[in-house]
Image: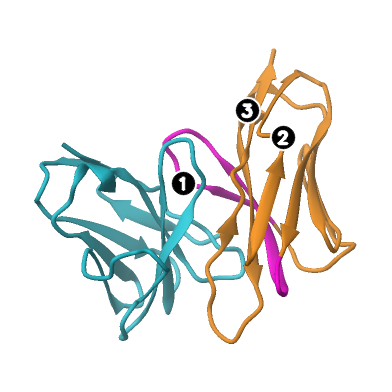
Chain colours: A cyan, B orange
Amino acid sequence: GAVVSQHPSWVICKSGTSVKIECRSLDFQATTMFWYRQFPKQSLMLMATSNEGSKATYEQGVEKDKFLINHASLTLSTLTVTSAHPEDSSFYICSPLGNEQFFGPGTRLTVL
Amino acid sequence: EDQVTQSPEALRLQEGESSSLNCSYTVSGLRGLFWYRQDPGKGPEFLFTLYSAGEEKEKERLKATLTKKESFLHITAPKPEDSATYLCAVQVSGGGADGLTFGKGTHLIIQP
């Protein structure tokens, strides 16, 4: 199956700072990448869909100016949480489009 | 609106005690139904994709089935290492790439 990595695996930051999360598709080219977040004891919720070389599309209720997504290559997509606040603390997971929809290992973001 | 409902929310079984997890769905058009296993602090681990009613797939002690309204994940003679949260998700048919809509999961505990 597809091998997906995320970096960092966890990050703690102060309120107001920005955090960048990288998602790499290691063994195949991902034209489309999905970004999800998961709050404690809840299920995964789709945040946005990024396509290589074009703008991302965001789900209803997700601020596009706060969650910046860049999909500059077929193997790398990044999610930047700008001016992070405690309510952005969550588990962020990426998933490249594929028949079996594999997921990355996730990034735990804690905003103090 | 697409909906995925999983039951029960939590299930505690003795080792060797077989059971089934339910995932009922309401979607405009089903492209695929996915089952994942998620351990605490980790990304979902892909188990199965089912595409059409009547389809069945097996992997070790797990067997997934699909009807037009629901899917079951049957666990036969479970072991403590099968303890995890099991997530069901649907992908709807449409013109473009669509992310998954997840249920809230079933938290399964297998006691030795």
- Residue B37 colored in magenta in the image: yes
Image quadrant holding the C terminus of chain A, namely top left
Residue that label 3 marks: B83
Amino acid at circle 1: Gly
Is residue A10 at all visible to an observer of this figure? Answer: no
- Establish if A44 lies above or below B69: above
Q: Position of residue B10 (x, y in %)?
A: 66, 29
Task: Give the magenta part as a residue range.
Answer: B27-48
Q: Is residue A97 left or right of residue A110?
A: right
Dot 3: chain letter: B
Disc 3 from disc 2: Cα separation: 14 Å
**B110 relative position to A98: left or right:** right
Q: Which mark is residue A69?
A: none
| Three-letter residue code for mark 3 | Ser
In-image side of A4 versus B36 (left or right) = left
Q: Residue at x 22, y 64 (%)?
A: A66
- Residue A77, picture quadrant: bottom left
Q: What residue type is labelled 2?
A: Pro
Q: Where residue B8 is drawn, which disc sits there?
A: 2
Q: What element carries label 3?
A: loop
Where residue A87 sits in the image (x, y, percent)? Answer: 27, 45
Q: Seen in the image, is A62 located left or right of residue A81?
A: right
Determine which residue is flagged by label 1: B43
Q: Nearer the viewer, residue B29 or B80?
A: B29
Q: In which quarter of the image is residue B81?
A: top right
* Eye-nearest disc, 3 or 2: 2
What residue appears at the point 40 percent right and 43 percent down from the top-left corner?
Answer: A39
